[in-house]
Structures are given as C-alpha cells and as structure tokens.
Image (cartoon, rainbow, N blue to C red):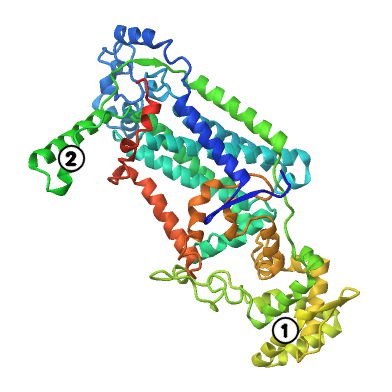
C-alpha cells in the first residue's frame, strides 16, 4: 500500500484508484442494502400481527406517550404517587415529567418497531455509531503512548492503523446512512431537526477527520496544512485556527470537536427515539396536469393540492398503528460493534497505514541545496510567497476578495517578516561565535534598504548557476555584497538541523507550532515537487488523496470540485470561492426539508420503493 498510487483522469476529474475503490465499495454496500432481503422479514410477521391485536398499543419508536396506551396506571406506578401541587412546581419535577413525556423507557430502549423497518438501509445508523465508538477507543489507545508513539513503535503503528480504518469505516457508513435517509425523505413528519442534527454531525465529522490528518506529523499532514491554510486564511479563520500549529490541531482533534460531536450524535439519536424512524412514502397525491402548466391553476386545483399536502403531512406525523416486529436494539448494537471491530482489525493488520516521513529544512538542503539558497535569497529580497502573502502574516499582499476581503477583518495575527524570521534572526544568534559572519551581518545591517534589496536580488540571480565544492556553495561573482557569506552560513545551519530547531523555537514554551519552518519550506520548489510525486497537489485532486495507494478523504470532493471548474480554476479568489460554494452546498443539504424541489426529489425518483418494497 505504500507503493506509488494509480490515478485515473477524466475531463476535469482526477481520482486515485484507491479512492475510486472506496467509493465503489460504498455504492455497492448501499445497493446491497436496497436489494438484499432483511433476515426474519416474513417469519415473524404473522406472529407479530397477532401480538399487536392481542395487546394494547405500546410506545413504539414514533408514538407519543398519550397515544401509546390507555391502560390505567398500577397502584405502584408513578401515577399512584400523586405529588402535591407544591412538589409538582419544583424545577426537578417539571424537567423529569417533560423528559418522561417525551422519552419514556419504551422509546429509549424499544423492544418492538414498525414492521416496515425491515431493510438493511436502517442498519447503517447503528453501524455508524459502532464505528464511531471504535474510532474513539482506538484514539484512546494512541493517546496512551503519546504523540510520537505511532511513528516509533510497531504496536503504536498498529494502533494508528486501527484508528485510521475505524475512521474510514465510520465515514463510509455515515455517508451511506445519509444517502439512505435522503432517499427516504427522512425529514417528514416533524423530523426536520433530526435530519439537520445528522447533517451537522456529518459536517463536523469531516472537520474532525481533517484535524486528524493534520495531527499525523508526516508529509501528508504537512502538505495538507500548508495548502489548507490558504482557504482558511482567505475567510479570516486562519488567524485563529492555524493548521500549521500541530498542538492546536491535536487538541481540537482529541478534545474540542469530539465533545461537540458526541453531543450532536447524542441529540440526533434522542430525536430518532422521540420522533421515530420515517414511514414509507405514500403514493403520489394530486398534481397539476401538464396542460395546467401553460395556464394559471384553478382555485379547485390549488385547494386540492393544499388539502393533499396537509393530509400528507398529517399522515407523516401520525403515530404508527400498523403491525410491529421484535427489535433487540442492544443485540443489534453489539453485533454491529463486533463486525466493525473485525473489519477494522483485519484492515489494519493487512493494509497497515501510511507514514511517509515529514520534510524538514535539514532534509531539504541535503537533496536540493541550490533550491534552499535561492529560496533564502527570495526571503531577503521580499519576493517569496510568504513575503507577499498578506494577512494573517503581513500587510505586503492583497487578500482574496468577493464583495469584501474577510482576511482583513482579523488582520495580521501571526506576524512574519520573512527576511528577519528566516534569515537574519537565525544568523544573528550564530554571529557571536563566527567573526566572518558577524562582519558580513554588520555590513548588511548598516546598508540602506535599497542597497540590501540590490544585493539580495543580484545574489538571487547569480545563485541560479551555483555549484558546490566540498559541499561549499560557489556562486558566480555579482554585486551581492555580504550576502554570499551570510547564506553560506545559513546553509551550514540548515545542514546541521540548527535552523529547524531555531524556527520552531521562536515561540514561548512548547515547540508545537510549525508555522515558520513550514512556510519557509513552502516557499521553495523541493517541497511542492515531493507533493507532486505523491499526487497530493491541487490540480491532482490532492485534498482527497493519501500518500501511496491508501484511500484518503473522498468525502471532500465537494470542496475540491470548485478548484477545477472552468472559469474559476484560474481565479485569484479561488480559495474564497471554494469556501463559499462548499458552504452553500452544505446549507442546501442542511435545509433540504424546507426547500421545495430539493425535498421532493425522493418522490420523483422512487428509490424508496426498494427500501420499502414489501411494506
């Protein structure tokens, strides 16, 4: 799996074979869920129907308590207590009564469900929960060994592999679950909030996976961080949510997002318990005839449509009164967890997980010292990407703008002067022990800004023809003043690893913020050449890819898509456009229950008949 990946190209699309295989497997699983008969679908139908006729109505998934039973309370039940008025006005009593009214034990842990819930499509909600739990547990095991355990220890690497594949399974199942609920129009019957919490949980899961990739500390995480920052910076978020700060991303990944995600998933599950699962879509009601489209509809036609809509909404919201079937929710959850564990352990054992070593300034100069020297010269003369970036690093660049420039709102929050940060400050620390360097720095600092720029620019031109004698750079003569001495020393610092340490140490306390070394790396060519070789660049649909033949993040296709749309892909504001369009797509998905046309697609394309084909 660590061998170079294979890629397919079609029109504006480039997709890795591993991503394509993962998507194909997800589609195949969804298709099988639609077509394969559900076990026990018919064997208990007659018995369940008899049981339903022999007992009073019971509180099944979607039934309100008041509709569930008319049987009198027993003498020992809650009704027998008859609390006095003073007790009933207590906050505790009010909250308890409302909770019990909305979610009695028969709903929270049901042992029966409507007979139509006999399709594999209904299983993927539980499967998503099981794999989510496995992802949390496998993440805990990684935490036991620390932040570098998975790179240095075989057991740690296996735990990382287990975590990777449990997350891949979780995202695959949650996407299939979302597909199923869309074609079931699962927002019907006052279930819009159930749908919306599910969509938000899915979107937050994508962010959780994203921060997980950023926390890997390998080359893939480096590249995602340096490229992803552009979109976050364009909308002003990068000033506070720094993708290149490993410590920040790790804490978001293991603490902040999981807490919110667990709460959202919990709320989603409770809403499912309260409102119940959606019923089969009814037969199509009255519609305007084709001839009516060329004229204004009559009052009678409009009245019929309104009445049909009201009747349909009332039927969707009404409690289920049809036959039910036995439903052991704990058994189903246990089986789902075991299957998820077997799948994840098997995949982790056979396929492992990628772990390409990160690029450092030291590894950069060992392979491409000429590129390093040229990049350092660009930092000095102010022509590098970082030097001309703009907020949140400096005011030298023009931020992306659509109507307004969001990056200007927070402004410069992570100030970086590339010449000072990447070259002059590290050299100044070495100068006290190097007389030749001290003299060169004194000459450079005493010169005017125009003279400094001239020296750096002339050196940048001459260094294109640099050669090396005993590892020392030999640059053609030019009017570059003390710059050759300065950058030769900078090269020596980089080869020793001192420059890596210095750029990471230019921060208080712990060195977990790799913004400065990563920006310096990004300004050179070597870094992007490595990414191109691994098919991770933007024109290769790289945000969806993983190094080697591993599946990456195919659920990010909506975001990546905008970078390849003709007319936009060469726009200066492309990162901002991609964020806006992805946000719009997410909002459309979130508010499907309220958007005419979108919410009617499941009625027009009757995939639901495969789900409820025997209902």
159 vs 601, nearest the viewer: 601
- Image coordinates of residue 387 in percent, x first then y, are 61, 76
Report the residue marked by disc 2.
288
Q: Position of residue 529 (x, y in %)?
A: 69, 63
Report the quarter where the N terminus lies: top right
> Relative to the observer, which residue lies in front, 230 or 95?
230
Residue ranking furthest to the right = 470
Seen as rendered, the residue at the extreme left is 299
Residue situated furthest front in the rendering: 291
Q: Secondary structure at mark 2?
A: loop
**What residue is shown at x 53% (from left), y 77% (from top)?**
395
Q: Could you tell me which quadrant the C terminus lies in?
A: top left
Q: Is residue 422 left or right of residue 198?
A: right
Q: Position of residue 120 (x, y in %)?
A: 47, 25
At label 1, counting other C-alpha atoms closer than 10 Å, the crowd grade (few under 14, some 14-19, many 20 or more) is some
Which residue bears the numbered disc 1? Answer: 461
Visible residue check, residue 243? no
Q: Which of the numbered marks, if any, corresponds to residue 159?
A: none
Q: Position of residue 468 (x, y in %)?
A: 86, 76
What residue is shown at x 49% (from left), y 42% (from top)? Answer: 261
Circle 2 crowding by C-alpha within 10 Å: few under 14, some 14–19, many from 20: few
Name the one closer to the observer, 542 or 242: 542
348 displayed left or right of 318: right
Instruction: Say which quarter of the image contains residue 52.
Output: top left
Q: Secondary structure at mark 1?
A: helix
Q: Earlier in the sequence, mark 1 or mark 2?
A: 2
- Residue 80 position by quadrant: top left
Calculate the distance from the C-alpha at mark 1 to the C-alpha at mark 2: 73 Å
Give the vertical position of 524 relative to 543 (above or below): below
């Amino acid at each position: 799996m660590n061998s170079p990946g294979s890629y397919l190209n079609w029109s504006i699309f480039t997709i890795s074979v591993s991503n394509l295989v993962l998507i194909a497997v997800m589609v195949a699983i969804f298709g099988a869920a639609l077509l394969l008969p559900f076990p026990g679908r018919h064997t208990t139908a007659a018995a369940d129907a008899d049981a339903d006729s022999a007992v009073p109505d019971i509180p099944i998934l979607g039934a309100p308590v008041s509709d569930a039973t008319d049987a009198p309370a027993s003498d020992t039940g809650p009704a027998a207590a008859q609390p006095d008025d003073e007790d009933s006005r207590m906050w505790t009593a009010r909250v308890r009564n409302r909770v019990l009214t909305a979610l009695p034990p028969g709903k929270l842990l049901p042992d029966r469900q409507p007979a139509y819930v006999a399709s594999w499509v209904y299983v993927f909600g539980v499967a998503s929960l099981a794999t989510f739990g496995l992802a949390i547990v496998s993440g805990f095991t990684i935490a036991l060994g620390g932040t570098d355990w998975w790179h240095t220890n075989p057991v740690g690497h296996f735990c990382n592999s287990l975590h990777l594949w449990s997350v891949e399974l979780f995202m695959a199942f949650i996407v299939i679950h979302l597909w199923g609920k869309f074609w079931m129009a699962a927002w019907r019957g006052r279930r819009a909030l159930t749908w919306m919490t599910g969509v938000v949980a899915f979107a937050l899961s994508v962010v959780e996976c994203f921060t997980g990739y950023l926390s890997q500390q390998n080359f893939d995480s480096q590249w995602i961080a340096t490229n992803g920052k552009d979109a976050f910076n364009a909308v002003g978020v990068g000033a506070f949510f720094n993708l290149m700060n490993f410590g920040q991303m790790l804490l978001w990944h293991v603490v902040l997002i999981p807490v919110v995600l667990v709460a959202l998933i919990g709320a989603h599950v409770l809403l499912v318990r309260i409102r119940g699962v959606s019923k089969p879509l009814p037969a199509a009601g009255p519609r305007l005839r084709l001839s009516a489209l060329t004229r204004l509809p009559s009052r009678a036609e409009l009245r019929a449509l309104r009445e049909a809509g009201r009747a349909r909404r009332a039927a969707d919201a009404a409690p289920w009164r049809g036959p039910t079937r036995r439903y052991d929710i704990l058994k189903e959850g246990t089986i789902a967890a075991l299957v998820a564990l077997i799948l994840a352990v098997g995949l982790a054992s056979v396929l492992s997980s990628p772990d390409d070593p990160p690029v450092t300034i030291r590894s950069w100069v060992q392979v491409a010292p000429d590129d390093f020297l040229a990049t350092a010269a660009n930092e000095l003369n102010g022509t590098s990407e970082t030097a001309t970036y703009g907020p949140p690093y400096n005011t030298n660049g023009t931020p992306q703008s659509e109507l307004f420039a969001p990056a200007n709102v927070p402004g410069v929050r992570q100030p970086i002067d590339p010449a000072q940060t990447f070259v002059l400050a590290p050299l100044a620390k070495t100068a006290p022990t190097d007389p030749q360097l001290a003299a060169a720095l004194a000459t450079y600092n005493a010169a005017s800004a125009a003279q400094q720029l001239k020296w750096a620019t002339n050196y940048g031109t001459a260094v294109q023809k640099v050669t090396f004698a005993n590892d020392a750079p030999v640059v053609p003569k030019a009017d570059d003043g003390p710059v050759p001495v300065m950058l030769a020393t900078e090269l020596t610092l980089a080869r020793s690893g001192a420059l890596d340490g210095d750029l990471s140490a230019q921060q208080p306390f712990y060195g977990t913020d790799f913004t400065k070394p990563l920006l310096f790396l990004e300004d050179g060519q070597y870094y992007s050449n490595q990414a191109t070789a691994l098919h991770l660049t933007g024109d290769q649909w790289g945000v969806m890819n993983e190094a080697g033949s591993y599946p990456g993040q195919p659920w990010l296709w909506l975001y990546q898509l905008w970078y390849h749309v003709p007319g936009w892909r060469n726009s200066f504001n492309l990162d901002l456009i991609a964020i806006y369009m992805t946000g719009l797509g997410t909002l459309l998905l979130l508010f499907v229950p309220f958007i005419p046309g979108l919410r009617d697609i499941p009625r027009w394309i009757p995939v639901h008949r495969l789900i409820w084909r025997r209902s």
